[in-house]
Image (cartoon, helix red, strand yellow):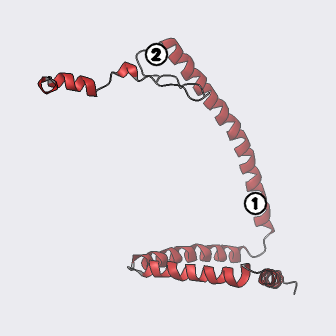
Amino acid sequence: MAATASPTAATAVLRPSLTAFQPTRRSALPLLPPRIGSPSFPTSLKFSLESRRSSLLQTRASSSEESSAADASELFTDLKEKWDALENKSTVLLYGGGAIVAVWLSSILVGAINSVPLLPKILELVGLGYTGWFVYRYLLFKSSRKELADDIEVLKKKIAGTE
């Protein structure tokens, strides 16, 4: 008798009805409201939500604008004072331009190395090997950590010019 059943009967058994699957609430969070563009949403509620949302956005934007404008003006005044206090402005500009050119050239070099097949993977292995050696040499034991800290302090003193 099951072999004589029609195909529509078989699909009715396999396809559940949509009313049977209503979502159950498992959290204490409130449900989201329906989309504003849906036809079941009242127009007066649409207008009130849109006006409330836009007023919140305007309030946030104006409060953040005032604080950022104050921060920007303080930043510019500090920079202007420091710039006026410099004696060799051309040297600062030269170093800044040199730094920009160095970053640009290094990005070109990294791009060229990255385009060579297998070379990036080999360099990754070299980096992993060096990292492993550094951890073993300086970070694994207490005496070697003390030695690393002393080396860093000596380097700081050399850079600061106090040694």
Picture quarter with the C terminus: bottom right
Residue under label 2: 41
For the residues labelled 2 and 1, the Cα–Cα distance comes to 56 Å
Where residue 27 appears, x then y in whole percent? Answer: 59, 29
Classify residue 57 as left or right of residue 19: right
Q: How many marks?
A: 2
Q: Looking at this view, is 75 or 162 the one in front? A: 162
Classify residue 62 as left or right of residue 108: right
Where residue 132 appears, x then y in whole percent? Answer: 62, 80
155 shown above or below 3: below
Disc with the residue nearer the chain's start (2 vs 1):
2
4 shown above or below 72: above
As helix, strand or loop, the secondary structure at mark 1 comes to helix
Residue under label 1: 80
45 shown above or below 153: above
Which is in the foreground here, disc 2 or disc 1?
2
Where residue 17 appears, x then y in whole percent? Answer: 33, 21
> Which residue occupies the extreme bottom position in the image?
163
* Amino acid type assigned to the residue bearing label 1 in the image: Lys
Q: Which mark is residue 52?
A: none
Where residue 93 appears, x then y in whole percent? Answer: 66, 73
- Marks 2 and 1: CB-CB under 8 Å? no
Q: Looking at this view, is 32 or 46 the one in front? A: 32
Q: At x 45% / y 74%, what residue is drawn?
A: 111
10 shown above or below 110: above
The 10 Å Cα crowd at callout 1, few under 14, some 14 to 19, many 20 or more, is few
* Amino acid type assigned to the residue bearing label 2 in the image: Phe
As helix, strand or loop, the secondary structure at mark 2 comes to loop
Classify residue 133 by image quadrant: bottom right
Classify residue 147 as left or right of residue 21: right
> Which residue occupies the extreme left position in the image?
4
Q: At x 42% / y 20%, what residue is drawn?
A: 38
